[in-house]
Image (cartoon, rainbow, N blue to C red):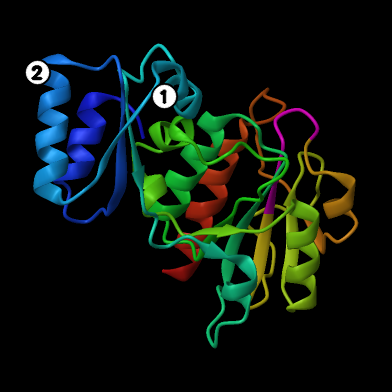
């Protein structure tokens, strides 16, 4: 995460473990001194780097304020490890080609709020889990049940082999998210903002699902669609 106030809040949060703080070598004055004191009190090392390096790491040079913090995400693990558990996740989201950090961040926040077992965020083809995603999630990304793998296609193959039903959202599907019969283990694919679900994943889809929209709107933003789906799963569980 970046910015003086967010970093100070992270250092003061007993529920988070901060690995290190990085200060730009141009960051001086009371603000930098306050962060240094807070890091020392929390037992967190502070490193200095060039202002350019901090901007590159933050991905947002206008708002980093010369400070970054690396925060440990305790619920993040490999998808392979999750599937090998004695009690593997029963309901997961799979992100396929979602490249806008704001969408990834909001999906992580929504899925965590809905109590889903996992959000699969591939390392390729999806926005990186960087400070922009963290900001969009309002910090929830650190506590989200993130599952990692190489690509969405790799994840789809692993899920299919593990016996999961694979359901993809598509506007033209006849079956809706409200009336589909789901197996004990199900993964829901959310496609990219422009291209939707890719062909590699599409070949493995068990069934396509739609969100009924009586109004004159063609589709929803992917993060809004994720919210509808996530809380339909909450409704079913209740």
Local crowd size for mark 2, using a 10 Å CA cut-off: few (<14), some (14–19), many (≥20): few
SS class, disc 1: helix
Q: Which residues are magenta?
A: 189-195
Q: Position of residue 5 (x, y in %)?
A: 20, 27
Q: Residue at x 22, y 48 (%)?
A: 44
Circle on res. 200 = none
Q: Residue furthest top?
A: 62
Q: Position of residue 74 (x, y in %)?
A: 38, 61
Q: How many marks?
A: 2
Q: 88 or 174: which is nearer to us?
A: 88
Q: 75 or 41: which is nearer to us?
A: 41
In the picture, which quadrant includes the N terminus?
A: top left
Is residue 193 on the magenta stretch? yes
Residue identified by numbered label 1: 54
Which of the 4 image quarters holds residue 89? bottom right
Q: Position of residue 16 (x, y in %)?
A: 26, 53
Q: Residue at x 55, y 83 (%)?
A: 85
């Amino acid at each position: 995460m970046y910015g003086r106030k967010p970093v100070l809040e992270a250092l003061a949060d007993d529920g988070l473990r901060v690995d290190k703080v990085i200060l730009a070598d141009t960051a001086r004055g009371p603000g930098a001194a306050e962060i240094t004191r807070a890091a020392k009190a929390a037992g967190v090392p502070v490193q200095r780097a060039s202002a350019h390096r901090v901007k590159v790491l933050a991905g947002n040079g206008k708002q980093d304020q010369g400070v970054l913090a690396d925060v440990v995400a305790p619920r993040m693990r490999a998808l392979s490890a999750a599937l090998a558990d004695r009690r593997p996740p029963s309901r997961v989201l799979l992100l396929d080609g979602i490249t806008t950090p704001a969408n990834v961040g909001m999906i992580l926040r929504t899925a965590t709020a809905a109590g889903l077992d996992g959000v699969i965020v591939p390392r390729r083809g999806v926005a990186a889990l960087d400070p922009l995603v963290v900001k969009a999630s309002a910090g929830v990304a650190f506590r989200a049940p993130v599952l990692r793998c190489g690509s969405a296609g790799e994840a789809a193959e692993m899920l299919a082999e593990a016996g999961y039903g694979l359901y993809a959202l598509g506007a033209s599907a006849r079956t809706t998210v409200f009336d589909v019969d789901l197996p004990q283990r199900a993964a829901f694919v959310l496609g990219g903002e422009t291209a939707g679900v890719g062909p590699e994943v599409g070949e493995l889809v068990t069934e396509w699902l739609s969100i009924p929209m009586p109004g004159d709107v063609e589709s929803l933003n992917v993060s809004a669609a994720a919210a509808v789906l996530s809380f339909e799963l909450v409704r079913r569980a209740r």
